Image (cartoon, rainbow, N blue to C red):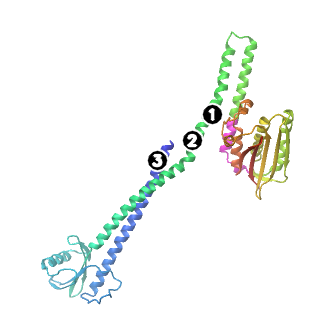
Amino acid sequence: MIKKLQIKFVIINMSIVTIMLCVILGLVYHFTKANLEAESINMMQNIARQPFRLEIPNELGEDVRLPYFIIQIGHRGELLATGGGYYDLSDKEFLDDLINVVIRSPKTFAVIEEYNLRYYRLDTPLSYFLVFSDISSERATLNNMMRSCLIIGGLSFFMFLGISVLLSKWAVKPVDLAWKQQRQFVADASHELKTPLTVIITNAELAQSPEYDEDSKQQFLNSILTMSGQMRSLIEKMLELARADNMDLKESFDIVDFSKLVSNTLLPFEPVFFERGLTLTSQVDKDIKVKGEASQLCQVLDVLLDNAQKYSKEAGITWVTLRKHGKRRCLLAVANEGESISPEEAQNIFKRFYRGDKARSRTGSFGLGLPIAESIVTGHRGKIWLESSNGINCFYVELPCA
């Protein structure tokens, strides 16, 4: 699919480029041709107004001077005079042929293809003045321009083709990444659902078997309930992640007292930490307000605190701080004592269903909490990251202040 999308991008882009090149080069050729023709006709008109005028060297004026000659004929078609130094005008058959062509033609301007000449006819009460101009140089110029346009167009086409191929790779890269993430998400979700579903089916079959007593069947039913609860929890997490990805949070944004929200969210976690023999300390600066959705921001802190109590070492300490970070941003930090996390794992820990550490398997985590938190923080125009050193793992959440 990505390859077809890339090819389609290149085809559309090159079609536009080809049309633009044809239009631009065509207009250049057309206007050049029209300009040369207009200059030639203007020269012939000026010559026809002052026929047989003697020119002074180096005083040709602003007119373009092409090889030309003049023929003056009477109204009956008789040759009266000729002039011009570019051609041999002694050939009467040649002159008669030109005169017959011009007299038969109703046009004032025209080109005689046989002789490669353009003529202009000026009618006067006593006679006709016929000015002929050689257009060989004009056509040679146009032919050279045509070749140049074809060469420039061809080189430009292949140059833009190379650029389009590179641009197509860059343009479809986010689509390719999203496609791979989607496929990975489906594969991981299927894998996560497959194990509890297999357990449920197996225990249901055993519960129906007459070989087991009532106590064993009750254990099978308990296993079914446990696995069903696990599947329900996983599906709820997946739905939360889908809502976080698709919800337009900005529609429900409001001014939130982030300091108060953090303090209130910490309260229900204090007994949880206490029961596990862990210490939870906090330092929250007052009057820090952000623009966002309160329940979503509360969920981010829930995820971070839940991770902290799950992965803390025995009798470990968890620190929660909230402070201003610069003039227009605030920084929330949730740090706990635990097993150090490598830089590579710190980059992958926000991936969906990621289980780089063995602790996640022990706690029954699905690897969706942090991706949900990241999606919410991104929707609030903030960023979240993890830093780990000296046995301290710290999650940072940076948000713009209201």
Give residue 179's mark: 2
- From the viewer's side, name the closer residue of 380 and 108: 380
Question: Where on the picture, by quarter, is residue 296?
Answer: top right
At x 20%, y 72%, the residue is 115
Question: Is the residue marked by circle 1 packed among few (<14), some (14-19), or many (20+) residues within 10 Å?
Answer: some
At x 32%, y 87%, the residue is 58
Give residue 391's mark: none
Q: Name the residue furthest top.
A: 211
Q: Earlier in the sequence, mark 1 or mark 2?
A: 2
Distance, label 3 to label 1, CA atoms, is 30 Å
Q: Which residue is mark 1?
A: 188
Name the amino acid, label 2: Trp
For the residue labelled by badge 3, is the local secondary structure a helix, a strand or a loop? helix
- From the viewer's side, name the closer residue of 25 and 153: 153
Residue 402 coordinates in the image, percent (x, y): 77, 56
- From the viewer's side, name the closer residue of 306 and 82: 306
Question: Is the residue marked by circle 2 packed among few (<14), some (14-19), or many (20+) residues within 10 Å?
Answer: some
Q: Is residue 82 left or right of residue 244?
A: left
Name the amino acid, label 1: Asp
Q: Is residue 167 above or below residue 186?
A: below
Task: Tell me if residue 266 is in the magenta stretch.
Answer: no
Q: Which residue is mark 3?
A: 7
Name the amino acid, label 3: Ile
Q: Which residues are magenta?
A: 237-253
